[in-house]
Image: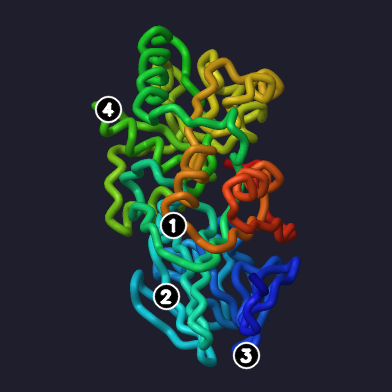
Amino acid sequence: MRVPEWIEINPQGLRLKAADVWIDPARPVPRALVTHGHSDHARAGHGEAWATAETLAIMAARGQSPAIAQPLGYGARADFAGVTVSLHPAGHILGSAQIRMEGPDGTVIVVTGDYKRSPDPTCAPFEPVPCDILVTEATFALPVFRHPPPATEVARLLETAARNPDRALLVGAYALGKAQRLAALLRAAGHHAPLYLHGAMEKLMALYAAHGVQLGDFRPVAGTERDALAGAILLAPPSALADRWSRRLPDPLPAMASGWMRIRARARQRGVELPLILSDHADWDELTATIAELRPREVWVTHGRDDALVHWCETRQVRARALHLVGRDDEAD
């Protein structure tokens, strides 16, 4: 299947030719379609950016606002020089969207952005969108990556906290998406005690709350007496686990919530005592099941473990190619 005339494959991102609109471009451009607010997809400096209202709010909170913000709700349509574009939930983080594009030749291309299929109370669930060409990530596209049920990992976290009432349980979690999901899962598991936040987490926690995501009682670590933190769960950026900031905590027990915690060597390298396998990306089974469900004629892989996913597609008579887009960060999950 040849590339439709109306779209360009560029290492900097896909581009709708006639409208000169880029999808998640790696550099500032005059017009962009943005799948979600993580900084490897949402860049500062765009002249005009189309995204969900939640993604645009996240971009504003992180200093990435475009000159002109163009909100587009899920399911709403916009025309870009003959290409009809609509956004659909990706299940990745708050406001994350897949981009469906239907060209004048009738070909439908869906760009998933980053996505997951497992339930997440902090964002809209993934919506399967039929298409001719599926453009997918491959962050965890190896059979070794099969994420356990999130509730299992949260139960391990709570059991560890209960066994260590004199230690501060310090959980490294990505500040956008992962921290909020972990908080919601803790509340669903019945943990309603205050959660303590590193200063870098506070703004985005407040943003989620402002968008109606109920995450319970949060308090800043700063200004809290050391003794009050014993037995408490603290959320901080992963970098804080080895930072001087953590030294003021009562005998901190370092944990990390990430899909990469499946690789025990990574946990040891980071000095993590409690690795929690909790990812906001699709695992191997979710990636392959999505392709099998949608049955596209062709699969384009943007970044990650593309070789394995391309090979899986080809063994099932699905044409596939790796796009090798630049600027994608699959290590921050």
Question: What distance separates the C-alpha of mark 2 from that of mark 3?
Answer: 17 Å
Image height check: is 164 above or below 327? above
Tell me, for residue 189, which label it has, or none. 4
Of mark 4 and mark 1, the one earlier in the sequence is: 4
Q: Mark 1 points at which residue?
A: 294
Q: Mark 3 points at which residue?
A: 18
Q: Name the residue under label 2.
A: 86
Q: Are marks 2 and 3 in contact (CB under 8 Å)?
A: no
Residue 262 percent location from the top left of the image: 58, 25
Q: At x 37% / y 32%, what residue is drawn? A: 195
Answer with left or right where residue 28 lies relative to residue 259.
right
* Residue closer to the observer: 209 or 326: 326
Question: What distance separates the C-alpha of mark 1 from that of mark 2?
Answer: 17 Å
Of mark 1 and mark 2, the one earlier in the sequence is: 2
Question: What distance separates the C-alpha of mark 4 from that of mark 3?
Answer: 50 Å
Q: At x 62% / y 35%, what residue is drawn? A: 142
